[in-house]
Image: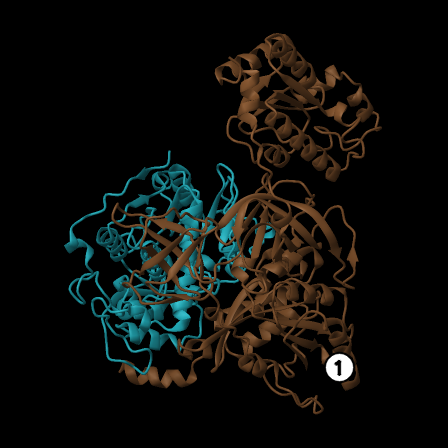
């Protein structure tokens, strides 16, 4: 039996909980700020100010395209859900959802698939975000996998299959969700470059990349039969840099792990893995050392490589990005099994 | 110091990262025949604009050794062909979207498949593009697929085309050959309505004239492909047209707020502007433009907003809010171009769903004016449209639609066709103009109406639509039901599948197109008889849900009752009252429902009659009892 427990957070009328935490007031707060570096200067909007005036035409166009997609799904589907994975893309996705339905709340809950191997900072940020925005949060863990002791050290890609893909399918089926929003972008990976905005899933939640529905203009076909569903990707046309520039322009809170700080790490297969808790298994000869690191992409801690960095502000992160020579998913060990890895996982139901 | 390193890095960064967010965006597609080098060209553009990361290049080198067809060189096609099946077969199946930028512009490029089989995926990529790069293999010149893609590019309203004459290295950069190809293409494209057509000789594989002017083509003085992409002007200003906004979602968080969320499709609007709600035609005034960042003073084309109206009037999803001074036209009959995208052909008369803007309505193609030979632009007579056919058709929708011709506005002039049974996107079309049948063909109001006619008969009219396999028992039960109703003094008429083919439908055969027309005519007759106050009993195999939905469409609830005579195929074969199953088994009949043609059982029939273990008499009684419960007979 899938174990889906309803969110502990209900919409709250307390304005104190809904206002954004002040900059630097807590670990989970608005991003720290620094002086401009010649890039888009950071600016905090004054209350009542027309903030869109500050948004570049390019980001405005991306934002409005995403809002259109959110509204189309809300109008055509009985039970949507937003797959909230806590990372920067999810932060942008959620921000866009809040905008799309303002002044109403988004007419769908958040769903987090908790593999039990996420960083503590991610879980704290998740709970704080749901509380701050007054949204329902569903957290689901594949209890079968937990009972079998499936873990990222012993089980490799089987771990991803059980604790992420299967868990997701369980939660979507248990909730009866007919549309699930995800933060995937076409620039991330080449099988994603092929995916539609409305991506059809069979009753078994599988993707058939060879039989995608034609998708012309912005006329999305939302017709499905009982049991079938769609995955929706409002950020399809965003790039990694767009995401960061939008976070900066809109002052969107992100998990503090994106900012550089000293962490105990070991180097493994060319990746810096943070020794996050006592469950981390050290190989013979490995000794954690403190290094200044941050994350470009967030996942399960034993599978997510950190990068050496001193960038502890958004402008510094963006400045650092300009020098990147490797893609964002380079730090995600699950993508490395084989060339067609992502496509296979997606066909099986991975996001 | 972060600031220092940022500045240092900035100078060395790939353009996609370095470009300020203010830079404009050009969306284009590459198209053309298989093996003309589309994917190679985009791979080259990404590589030379440094839009590729090191790990992506490493993977590409690895793949080039494994699957590549470029010998020692990197096979850029492998970068674009993101699906396993594509890499294994060495073909592009579906459109891929990639991102790159230069110092002047950012680009989204759609790499589309060349195979005719995947034309619908090419159309998907073309529908959101401002410009097309049409590749031609210099050795082969203009081929069928060049012409097909050009036609679809033109149909979807793309007005700027680059003719990229590729593989010039394989013809020794022969100028005469290049000029001949250009001249041939210009002749062909003369009537396609392109605003600009620029031919560039290049070699995607070696980079000639892609981003750098080639020493191999001293006779060519035009821009490189990239220079041209950076500078071409494709902008139109949709904000200059009268205001239009399809309503997407009604925002009603509490009793004190009611807003209409949507994206402005054309023009601009300010609070205080007079608006017309279409198709109802009611007028109102705009009170507020709400966004999450506060109210704004003006919204223009492309803005996603929520509009609050001054007066409480009825507005729902699918309506269009338009400038009261220049409202959009409203119609339910259209002439349109249609690209068919389904393996199942389009038949006139069959019911489909049409989605345009935010409105989805039932409707059908009433006539195929002609099919277009995309190679020669000839007009051909057609009874149906098959996968990848392009036709000019007349559409009839069940309810009116606010629209603009596609040439005026893409959002209000485009539509997709959805198969009611499979839900697939079966076609895509562009509205040319409304058919103004309404001006010379109006509905004549008659004083004696259905209520009056049926009151005289002391009954409620109904259509009992018996569906089921051949030999299921439809006609037997229908006959008994009519006898019972007749005995009760009710006024009835039976429309029988075999009987109507002796008269009304004797010109129709058993092709799928004719079967659709057969059902359409019977459904219309049934509606007339019901309008006359009769209880109509129609007994037809009617295997397709879409056709039964068509028969039901336009009737008020409670009149059309679907009666599913549910007999397993084995039992029908055993009964075989007309000896037809024996003929099928002997190979004398094909396309027989339930054997080699599909039967789609009703999903929610009003009356469900499993026949096994029941007599026709008891089943007929069950139908009559059901009519009693519904108040149709008293």
Which chain is assigned cyan? A
Residue B79 position (above or below residue B602): below
Q: Where is residue A86? Give x, y as percent.
A: 32, 56
Count the marks: how many?
1
Q: Quadrant of the N terminus of chain B?
A: bottom left
Q: Where is residue A95? Give x, y as percent.
A: 32, 59
Per the image, the residue denoted by label 1 is B178
Q: Colour of chain B?
A: brown
Q: Chain of mark 1?
A: B
Residue B255 can be seen in this image: yes
Q: Residue furthest front?
A: B447
In terms of depth relative to the viewer, which is nearer, B530 or B481?
Answer: B530
Q: Where is residue B159? Give x, y as percent.
A: 61, 71
Residue A159 can be seen in this image: no
Residue A120 position (above or below residue B631): below
In terms of depth relative to the viewer, which is nearer, A83 or A122?
Answer: A83
Identify the element where label 1 is drawn: helix
């Amino acid at each position: 039996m899938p174990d889906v427990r309803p969110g502990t957070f209900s919409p709250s009328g307390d304005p104190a909980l809904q206002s954004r935490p002040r900059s630097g007031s807590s670990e989970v707060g608005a991003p720290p700020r620094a002086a401009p570096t010649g890039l888009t200067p950071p600016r905090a909007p004054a209350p009542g100010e027309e903030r869109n005036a500050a948004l570049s035409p390019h980001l405005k166009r991306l934002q409005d395209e995403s809002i259109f997609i959110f509204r189309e799904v809300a109008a055509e589907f009985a039970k949507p859900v937003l797959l909230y994975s806590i990372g920067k893309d999810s932060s942008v996705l959620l921000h866009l959802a809040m905008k799309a339905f303002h002044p109403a709340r988004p007419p769908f809950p958040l769903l987090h698939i908790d593999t039990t191997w996420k960083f503590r900072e991610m879980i704290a940020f998740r709970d704080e975000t749901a509380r701050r925005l007054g949204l329902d949060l569903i957290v689901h863990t594949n209890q079968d996998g937990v009972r079998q002791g499936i873990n990222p050290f012993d089980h490799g890609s089987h771990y991803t299959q059980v604790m992420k893909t299967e868990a997701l399918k369980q939660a979507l089926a248990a909730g009866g969700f007919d549309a699930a929003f995800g933060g995937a972008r076409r620039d991330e990976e080449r099988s994603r470059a092929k995916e539609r905005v409305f991506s059809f899933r069979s009753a078994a939640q599988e993707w058939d990349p060879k039989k995608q529905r034609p998708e012309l203009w912005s006329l999305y076909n939302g017709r499905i039969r009982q049991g079938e569903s769609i995955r929706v990707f409002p950020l399809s046309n965003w790039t990694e840099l767009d995401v960061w520039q939008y976070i900066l322009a809109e002052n969107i809170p992100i998990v503090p792990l994106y900012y550089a700080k000293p962490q105990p790490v070991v180097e493994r297969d060319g990746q810096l893995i943070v020794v996050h808790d006592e469950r981390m298994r050290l190989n013979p000869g490995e000794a954690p050392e403190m290094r200044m690191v941050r994350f470009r992409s967030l996942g399960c801690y034993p599978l997510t490589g950190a990068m050496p960095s001193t960038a502890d502000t958004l402008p510094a992160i963006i400045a650092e990005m300009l020098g990147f020579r490797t893609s964002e998913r380079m730090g995600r060990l699950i993508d490395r099994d084989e060339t067609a890895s992502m496509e296979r996982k997606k066909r099986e139901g991975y996001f | 110091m972060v600031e220092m390193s940022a500045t240092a890095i900035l100078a060395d960064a790939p353009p996609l990262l370095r470009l300020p967010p203010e830079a404009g965006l050009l969306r284009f597609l590459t198209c053309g025949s298989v093996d003309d080098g589309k994917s190679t060209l985009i791979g080259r553009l990404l590589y030379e604009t440094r839009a590729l990361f090191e790990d992506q290049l490493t993977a590409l080198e690895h793949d080039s050794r494994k699957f590549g067809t470029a010998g020692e060189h990197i096979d850029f096609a492998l970068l674009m062909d993101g699906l396993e099946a594509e890499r294994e077969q060495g073909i592009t199946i579906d459109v891929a979207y990639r991102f790159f930028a230069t110092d002047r512009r950012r680009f989204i490029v759609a790499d589309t498949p060349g195979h005719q089989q995947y034309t619908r995926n090419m159309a998907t990529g073309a529908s959101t593009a401002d410009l097309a790069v049409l590749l031609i293999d210099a050795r082969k010149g203009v081929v069928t697929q060049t012409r097909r893609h050009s036609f679809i590019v033109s149909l979807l309203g793309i007005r700027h085309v680059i003719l990229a004459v590729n593989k010039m290295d394989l013809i020794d950069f022969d100028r005469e050959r290049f000029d001949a190809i250009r001249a041939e293409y210009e002749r062909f494209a003369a009537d396609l309505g392109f605003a600009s057509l620029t031919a560039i000789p290049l070699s995607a594989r070696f980079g000639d004239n892609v981003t750098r002017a080639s020493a191999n083509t001293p006779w060519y003085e035009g821009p490189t492909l990239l220079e041209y992409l950076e500078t071409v002007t494709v902008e139109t200003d949709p904000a200059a047209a009268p205001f239009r906004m399809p309503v997407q979602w009604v925002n009603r968080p509490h009793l004190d707020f009611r807003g209409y969320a949507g994206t402005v499709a054309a023009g601009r609007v300010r609070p205080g502007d007079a608006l017309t709600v279409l198709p109802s035609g009611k007028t109102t005034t705009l009170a507020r433009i709400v966004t999450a960042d506060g109210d704004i003073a003006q919204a223009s084309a492309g803005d996603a907003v929520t509009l609050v109206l001054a007066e409480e009037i009825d507005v729902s999803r699918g309506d269009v809010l338009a400038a009261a001074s220049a409202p959009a036209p409203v119609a339910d009959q259209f002439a349109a171009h249609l690209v068919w995208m389904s393996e199942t052909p389009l038949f006139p008369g069959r019911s489909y769903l049409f989605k345009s803007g935010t409105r989805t309505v039932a409707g059908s193609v009433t006539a195929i004016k002609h099919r277009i030979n995309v190679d020669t632009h000839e007009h051909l007579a057609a009874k149906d449209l098959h996968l990848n056919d392009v036709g000019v058709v007349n559409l009839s929708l069940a309810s009116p639609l606010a629209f603009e011709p596609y040439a005026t506005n893409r959002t209000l002039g485009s539509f997709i066709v959805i198969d009611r049974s499979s839900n697939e996107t079966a076609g895509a079309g562009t509205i040319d103009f409304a058919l103004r049948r309404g001006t010379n063909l109006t509905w004549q109001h008659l004083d004696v109406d259905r209520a009056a006619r049926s009151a005289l008969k002391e009954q409620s009219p109904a259509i009992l639509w018996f569906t089921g396999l051949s030999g299921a028992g439809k006609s037997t039960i229908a006959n008994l039901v009519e006898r019972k109703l007749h005995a009760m003094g009710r006024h009835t008429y039976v429309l029988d599948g075999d009987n109507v083919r002796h008269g009304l439908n004797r010109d129709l055969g058993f092709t799928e197109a004719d079967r659709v027309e057969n059902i359409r005519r019977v459904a219309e007759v049934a509606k007339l008889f019901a309008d006359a106050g009769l209880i109509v009993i129609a007994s037809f195999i009617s295997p397709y849900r879409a056709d039964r939905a068509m028969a039901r469409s336009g009737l008020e609830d409670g009149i059309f009752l679907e009666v599913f005579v549910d007999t397993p195929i084995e039992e029908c074969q055993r009964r075989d009252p007309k000896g037809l199953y024996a003929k099928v088994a002997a190979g004398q009949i094909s396309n027989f429902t339930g054997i080699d043609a599909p039967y789609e059982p009703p999903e929610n029939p009003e009356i469900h009659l499993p026949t096994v273990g029941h007599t026709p008499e008891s089943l007929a009684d069950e139908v009559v009892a059901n009519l009693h419960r519904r108040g149709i007979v008293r």
